[in-house]
Amino acid sequence: MEKTQSMSFVKEVSQVPGGEGVNLCMQCGTCTASCPSAKIWEYTPSEVIALVRADMRDVVLSSSSMWCCLSCYSCTVRCPRDVQPTSLFHALESLAVKHGYKPQNTSMPVMYNSFVKSIKKNGRVSEFQMMMGYYLSTNPFSALGMISVAWNLLSHGRLPLSARKIKGKKDLDLILKKLDDVRGDQ
Ligand code: SF4
Ligand code: SF4
């Protein structure tokens, strides 16, 4: 997807919460060496940062790489320049969604969306609702392979079919609305 932007990509990233440290990276590769999921990244963590620094907006935002981040924070605690790579990768996910990129080879954006919908509805995650939303938006037939797992969880009372709303749901709604206003998602 081609995007034309007046601002350079690296500057845009540096202005997104979480992306402030992008210019501090010295390409030591510690983040990649520390990352338990780096093998499945389209571009490794340090490569992603190098691509941002090279202003490769479309390459980065259409990539599935940052969606492979597990938020384990190994890179963040080991980065010698305090780049905060974990936050940076989540900032890139946020930018990809904001600019309408739909990365191939990953359904993580759909999973995140289903997670957020569940939070907005109940104030807490309903695993059943979240996974139903995910499978209905991706491949409903793939849910068949999870039936035995779901049955085991159900029979042990670990997978409630409905979710009770949290106390203070109205307060949470106000917080989420404020967040949407700030991020311009409305
Ligand atoms: S560990 Fe930090 S400084 Fe090193 S490549 Fe990763 S982000 Fe850059
Ligand atoms: S936080 Fe993400 S990028 Fe960093 S080491 Fe963990 S999985 Fe890899």
Image (cartoon, rainbow, N blue to C red):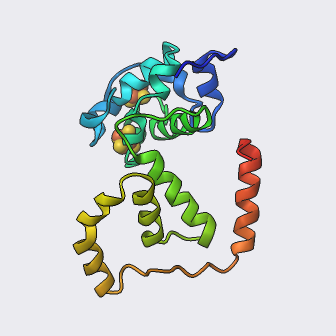
Q: Residue at x 77, y 48 (%)?
A: 181
Q: Residue furthest front?
A: 141
Viewer-nearest residue: 68 or 104: 104
Height in image: 20 above or below 67? Answer: above
Height in image: 60 above or below 165? Answer: above
Image location of residue 150, percent across then percent down? 30, 74
Height in image: 140 above or below 153? Answer: above
Image quadrant in which you'd find residue 167: bottom right
Left or right side of 106 for 19: right
Q: Residue at x 50, y 58 (%)?
A: 114
Image location of residue 142, percent across then percent down? 29, 58
Viewer-nearest residue: 26 or 159: 159
Viewer-nearest residue: 167 or 121: 121
Residue 156 in view, yes or no:
yes
Left or right side of 88 for 72: left
Height in image: 44 above or below 126? Answer: above
Image location of residue 1, percent across then percent down? 52, 22
Instruction: State which image quarter holds ligand 1.
Output: top left
Left or right side of 29 for 184: right
The mark total stands at 0
Q: Residue at x 53, y 79 (%)?
A: 163
Viewer-nearest residue: 36 or 60: 60
Q: Residue at x 35, y 86 (%)?
A: 157
Image location of residue 143, percent across then percent down? 31, 63
Residue 77 in view, yes or no:
no
